Each structure stands twice: as C-alpha cells, then as structure tokens.
Image: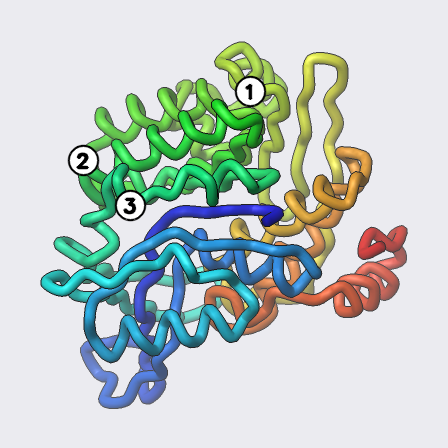
Amino acid sequence: MDVVTIGETMVLFTPESSPLMRYAHSYSRKFGGAETNVAIGLTRLGHQSGWISKVGNDEFGKAMVSFIRGEGVDVSQVTTDETAPTGLYFKEVKSGDNVRVQYYRKGSAASTLQPTDLNEEYIAHAKYLHITGITPALSDSCYETILEAINIAKGNGVKVIFDPNLRRKLWSEEKARRVLLEIAALADIILPGVDEGNFMFGESDPEKLGQLFLDHGASLVILKVGAKGAYYFTTENSQLVPGYPVESVIDPVGAGDGFAAGVISGLLDGLEIEEAVARGNAVGALATQIQGDFEGLPNREEIEQFTSESGSEDISR
C-alpha cells in the first residue's frame, strides 16, 4: 500500500433547482470527504491507497463504500456501525468564490472511530500515513485514534503527512489550535495554508511560517499560498513553486485535497520536491474546474495535457 488515510466521508447534497437550499426542491447526491478525496486522487494517478473509517448500517453508507471501492480505493478497513448513521452535508455553490457548507455529522458513525478499530499491520505496510485536522475534531475517540495511528506509523517507519484542514465549525478555536499544533509536531511532512499557519502560530509571512513549522518538528513543509502556488521549506532549502492559472474557478472545494494528492504522488514517484509541488499545484488547479469534491481530480494524461497547454514542463511522468 502506498498511502493509508483515516477520516470521515459524508453524503453530499447540492441544490440543483436553486443555489440556495431555502428555495431548492431538487438535489444531486454525491460523496465528499478530505481523506477520500486524497485517496481517490492518488488512485487516479496510479497509486495504491487505503481508507480507514466507519459508516452507518444504512443505504447511504452502503452506496458510499461501493462507490469509493469502485474508484480503486481499498475499503477493507471500513467498518459498519449498527447504531450511528452515515454523516451528511449540504453545499450551496452560488459562484466559484461563494460556497457555503452545512454539516449534519454530529453523532455520525465515523465519529465513533476508536483506537481498537486500527489494524497495525495495515498501517505498517504503507509508505505514508495521511491525516487531516478534521478527524480529531469529530470526537475524543477520533482524536485518540489519530494519535494511535501516528504512533503505529512512527513505530514502523511510515512517514506521517498532515494537512491541518482547519474546520472552525467543528470545535473551539482554543482546542483546535492546541490539537493542530500537537499533531504538527509529530508529522514528518505538513501541508498547511497560510491562513491555517496564521491560526496556529499567529504569523502570516510565508518565510517565517515555513521556519516555524520546521522548528516545530516537520522535516518538509509545503505552504499553500492560493493562486500564487506553494512554497516548500526544508532545513537546506526553500522556494516558491508558481501555481497554474485558470480562467475561472467553478468549485473550490476539494482543491486542497487535490493538491495533497498531487504532492504525495510526486513524492511516491521520486520527483524532486519542486516537481512534486508543481504536480500538486496542477492537480489542485484542475480540481477547481468541475463541480464536486473529487470529480475534477485528474489522471496522468489530463495533467500532461493541462501542463502542456500552460507551457510548463511535464510533471505527469
């Protein structure tokens, strides 16, 4: 297994008859979750990914597991909770820069994840463990599960990749800051945005943030700076890798997960850090061009075409 990820995926409803839920009478049903967005992005790029989670014993949960399995993600570590439901959320897309989400996930099946749900051998055989700051926000048991997963990974030489993925609606600012900093200190690679770095450290200068994350424990920091691209920082080097321009953003949700999938794919392929970040930039840009959390995630041929049209070096190889 190349990458194992842990977290909740929900059933996603998007209004079709009106962008506002208050006026909508018909909805499209899809699925969305940061961790499976990354897992699906990786399988489309030719890598093996596995997802650890729980779903409810309901039709939504059955449909979700079937769909994600169909995308090539290993779901052998997804279990069914007999008493808690599969989580839901609704997304209103007024425009590319005006998106609003509403969660119905409290008490969901995934929020009941606990350390005993983890299979040590499964994590130990991965090259990377990918986690986000969303899962520990769901419940105390989810927080404990993430810490145990990190402990298993470190004990077996598996590198930990952490995307803070701040969700302010899920917990208090004080608790979020404390936990995100705690997990960042345990991660090998961290993928924050400038806003998340500012939330965690009270600093918004990219160069200073990169050094703060390195000093905090990470060996590689890749800092997203929006359309401008992303910086990478190591103890030896730092550089801004320019982003790829797009004419318009159709749906920004999932772009950060696409970026993560692209970066991890590049690292798995043994690319130089700059090239891996460039692949992340390309995947993130393409993810914004189609409505849906993961529908716009590309395969290698699509990355090659996109970068070629952008006049950039091919980073799909």
Looking at the rendered structure, the secondary structure element under dot 2 is helix
How dense is the environment of label 2, judged by Cα within 10 Å: few (below 14), some, or many (20 and up)? some
**Residue 34 percent across, percent down from the top left:** 43, 53
Q: In this view, does 156 lie above or below 116?
A: above
Q: In this view, does 44 lie above or below 111?
A: below
What residue appears at the point 53 percent right and 56 percent down from the top-left corner? 39
**Residue 270 percent across, percent down from the top left:** 79, 39
* Disc 2: which residue: 140
Mark sitting on residue 241 = none
* Disc 1: which residue: 218
* Disc 3: which residue: 117
What residue appears at the point 43 percent right and 33 percent down from the top-left corner? 196
**Residue 26 percent across, percent down from the top left:** 28, 89
How many numbered marks are there? Answer: 3
Q: Is residue 180 above or below residue 71?
A: above
Marks 3 and 1, Cα distance to the nearest angstrom?
27 Å
What residue appears at the point 68 percent right and 29 percent down from the top-left corner? 232
178 to the left or right of 215: left
User: In terms of depth relative to the viewer, which is nearer, 178 or 44?
Assistant: 44
